[in-house]
């Protein structure tokens, strides 16, 4: 029974991916992509990776869909020709695809032949877990064992934000054309229920990340989704000047993590060592704020956001 | 199978029936609004029955409370989404209808 | 019991597959969006069933995330119809993007 379930999931993933790439209309491809994210989260759930399923749910099901829809909206505003899909076919397509298929097949063949045991690094992590302050091995890997990677990922987020600022044009509030439909009372009710709940769930995921699936990234993505909802419904409007919340929020994660690392270095305990669960939660809280701020600013496509006019 | 499992099975079968009905409505009804209507109503009820079945099987109050929250949020999200999509469908077409079976 | 739960998950997945027909056919964007709504609701039910079947209560958290974010796609979709007939935004020449140092 589980084989049938997993097999059907795999087939669905492949079919959806094909539909995304070869869709006749761009909109259909977008919807297929969102559905692909949903089924991918199911696949992670079947692979017993709830952390990844949480992240896929937050990013793939929510934010990516909104991002693609917004991009589609802006393309449409440029004229109906802009949304005609499909690259021109080239003579390299067939040999390249055969090459890639051969590569994937050989990788799969090798993977099937490997013994089904934990890798050396995984075994070392599992062995070191009981002495750690947190029980969730994913959090331990992210912050304790490979903290430097996470620090640099925060830097990458900041660089991405700066890069987006550099390439986007002078966007103004008129660019987004908030539809009047979102002034309906029902949307207000949705926001009144969802936004506070998102804050609560983000905090819950952050706290649970120590001992159960969760963590800063998942919580930050949920908070970002609430912010995206506010931007989409016109409660937050783009503004050319970033305020202190946007500026501090974007750098907070990097700042706190680096500061803690340097303090630990100064005290002779090694850079980026985590002296206890409190340090992990501190760094994760700062990371959550940074991730949420960066994602909302990237989606709002403006340096800052201000409270919009009440509908 | 004890009583709880039998009750959960019955609820699951009912929930599955409603999900099936929603999908049939989505595929067979003639018009986008009737499809939306069938889909939202049937799927919400199906979700509620599945949540009830899982609450019975889970056996903890905390889990049942979480399932209740999930169902209520599902109701909210589905209602708002259905309303918005139906309103948007009343507008002039955002893009020309794509014939089925396109390459 | 687990077998029944996994069988139910399989049944829901087949429902998903049938829903894909509506995404493929259309004909209007609203039709494709309503199929997306079907997917959201069905996936939540699948996750709840799998949470019980495989003994991973964290999957209920994933289901919670799904329902919370289900409305975002619809809200993003709603703006599409309005851009018909809207003039393309004219780029303002030489405007600095206002990010003071």
Image (cartoon, coloured by chain):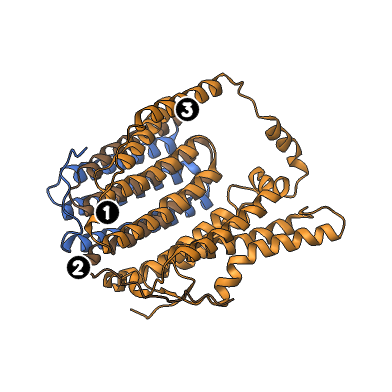
Chain colours: A orange, B blue, C brown
Q: Which mark is residue A83?
A: 1
Residues tagged by mark 1 and mark 2 found on one chain of the structure: no
- Mark 1, Cα crowd under 10 Å, few <14 / some 14-19 / many 20+, is some
Residue C84: x %, y % from top left: 21, 65
Residue B37: x %, y % from top left: 21, 54
- Which residue position is annotated with label 3? A104
Q: Disc 1 versus disc 2: distance between alpha carbons? A: 15 Å
Horizontally, is A157 left or right of A10 in the view?
right
Count every numbered label the image shows and give the total: 3
Nearer to the camera, C85 or A17: C85
What's the chain of the residue with tag 3? A
Horizontally, is A297 left or right of B84 in the view?
right
- Mark 3, Cα crowd under 10 Å, few <14 / some 14-19 / many 20+, is few
Element under label 1? helix
- Which residue position is annotated with label 2? C85
Element under label 3? helix
Nearer to the camera, C12 or B84: B84
Q: Residue at x 25, y 44 (%)?
A: C23
Residue A126 to residue A139: above or below: above
Q: Residue at x 49, y 62 (%)?
A: A164
Whether residue A224 is visible here, answered yes or no, is yes
Q: Disc 2 versus disc 3: distance between alpha carbons? A: 46 Å
Residue C87: x %, y % from top left: 24, 70
Horizontally, is A95 left or right of A81 in the view?
right
What's the chain of the residue with tag 2? C
Asked whether the beta carbons under mark 1 and mark 2 sit within 8 Å of each other, the answer is no
Mark 1 or mark 3, which is nearer the start of the sequence? 1
Residue lying at the far right in this picture: please name it.
A268
- Mark 2, Cα crowd under 10 Å, few <14 / some 14-19 / many 20+, is few
Q: Disc 3 versus disc 1: distance between alpha carbons? A: 32 Å
């Amino acid at each position: 029974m589980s084989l049938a379930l997993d097999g059907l999931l795999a087939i669905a993933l492949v079919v959806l991916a094909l539909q995304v790439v070869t869709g006749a209309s761009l909109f259909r491809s977008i919807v297929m992509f969102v559905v692909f994210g949903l089924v991918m989260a199911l696949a992670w759930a079947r692979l017993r990776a709830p952390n990844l399923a949480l992240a896929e749910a937050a990013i793939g099901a929510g934010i990516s869909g909104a991002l693609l829809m917004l991009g589609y909206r802006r393309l449409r505003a440029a004229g109906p020709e802009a949304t005609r899909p499909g690259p021109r076919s080239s003579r390299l397509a067939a040999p390249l695809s055969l090459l890639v298929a051969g590569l994937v097949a050989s990788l799969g063949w090798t993977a099937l032949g490997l013994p089904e045991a934990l890798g050396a690094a995984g075994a070392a992590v599992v062995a070191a877990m009981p002495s750690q302050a947190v029980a969730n091995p994913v959090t331990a890997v992210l912050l304790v064992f490979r903290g430097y990677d996470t620090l640099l990922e925060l830097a990458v987020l900041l660089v991405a934000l700066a890069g987006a600022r550099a390439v986007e044009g002078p966007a103004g509030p008129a660019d987004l054309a908030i539809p009047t439909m979102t002034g309906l009372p029902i949307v207000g009710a949705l926001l009144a229920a969802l936004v506070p709940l998102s804050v609560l769930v983000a905090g819950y995921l952050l706290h649970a990340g120590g001992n159960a699936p969760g963590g800063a990234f998942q919580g930050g993505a949920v908070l970002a989704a609430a912010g995206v909802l506010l931007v989409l419904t016109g409660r937050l409007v783009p503004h050319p000047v970033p305020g202190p919340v946007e500026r501090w929020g974007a750098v907070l994660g990097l700042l706190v993590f680096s500061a803690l690392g340097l303090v630990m270095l100064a005290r002779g305990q090694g850079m980026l060592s985590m002296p206890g669960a409190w340090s992990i939660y501190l760094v994760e809280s700062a990371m959550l704020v940074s991730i949420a701020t960066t994602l909302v600013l990237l989606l709002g496509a403006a340096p800052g956001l201000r409270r919009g006019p009440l509908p | 199978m004890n009583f709880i499992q039998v009750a959960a099975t019955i609820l699951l079968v009912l929930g599955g029936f409603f999900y099936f009905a929603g999908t049939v409505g989505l595929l067979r009804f003639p018009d986008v609004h009737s499809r939306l209507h069938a889909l939202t109503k049937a799927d919400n009820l199906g979700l509620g029955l599945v949540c009830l079945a899982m609450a019975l099987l889970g056996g903890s109050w905390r889990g049942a409370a979480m399932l209740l929250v999930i169902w209520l949020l599902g109701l909210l999200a589905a209602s708002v989404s259905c309303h918005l999509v139906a309103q948007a469908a009343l507008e002039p077409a955002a893009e020309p209808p794509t014939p089925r079976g396109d390459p | 019991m687990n077998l029944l739960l996994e069988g139910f998950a399989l049944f829901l997945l087949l429902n998903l597959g049938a829903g894909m027909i509506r995404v493929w056919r259309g004909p209007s964007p609203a039709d494709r969006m309503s199929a997306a709504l079907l997917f959201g609701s069905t996936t939540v039910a699948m996750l709840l069933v799998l949470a019980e079947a495989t003994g991973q209560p964290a999957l209920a958290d994933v289901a919670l995330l799904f329902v919370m974010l289900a409305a975002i796609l619809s809200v993003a979709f709603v703006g599409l119809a309005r851009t018909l007939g809207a003039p393309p935004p004219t780029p303002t020449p030489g405007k600095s993007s206002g990010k003071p140092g």
